[in-house]
Amino acid sequence: MNQAVCQIFGYERDHLVGMQFAALLPAGAEPVHLGAANLTAQGLRSSGEQFPLEVSINAVPIAGPQLMVGILRDITVRKAMEEELSRLAQHDSLTGLPN
């Protein structure tokens, strides 16, 4: 765990080490697979707030037990921009009426 993950989820590092990834998702959350090792899901901050999360998981090819490396991204801003672009594409920017 690095400091960025601690900030995203709002936990201290000691709390996150050893925690199952599923504990960082809302109960019953269904991840959406983008590819073999990429998915989006709703993350769950320590405050209980849910947020859109992108996850990329890859195996590290070394001898011994298989290690996995995960990259997590809070995509709240990206999702808001996508929604705004969709709204602008379907509505007149001056009047706000549907095209």
Image: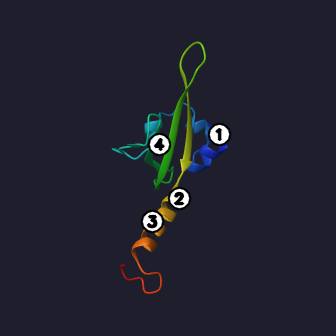
The residue sitting at the left extreme is 28
The residue sitting at the right extreme is 3
**Residue 77, placed above or below residue 1:** below
Residue 92 shown left or right of residue 70 in the figure: left
Within 10 Å of disc 3 (Cα), the crowding (few <14, some 14-19, many 20+) is: few
Number of numbered discs visible in the structure rendering: 4
Label 1 vs 3, first from the N-terminus: 1
The CA distance from mark 2 to mark 4 is 20 Å
The CA distance from mark 2 to mark 3 is 9 Å
**Residue 80, placed above or below residue 29:** below
Mark 1 vs mark 3: give the one in front. 3
Q: Residue at x 47, y 35 (%)?
A: 37
Residue 54 x %, y %: 50, 46
- Which is nearer the eye, 77 or 25? 77
* Circle 4: residue type: Leu
Question: Residue under circle 4?
Answer: 24
Label 2 vs 4, first from the N-terminus: 4
Label 2 vs 1, first from the N-terminus: 1
The CA distance from mark 1 to mark 4 is 15 Å
Mark 2 vs mark 4: give the one in front. 2
Q: Which mark is residue 2?
A: 1
Q: Secondary structure at mark 1?
A: loop
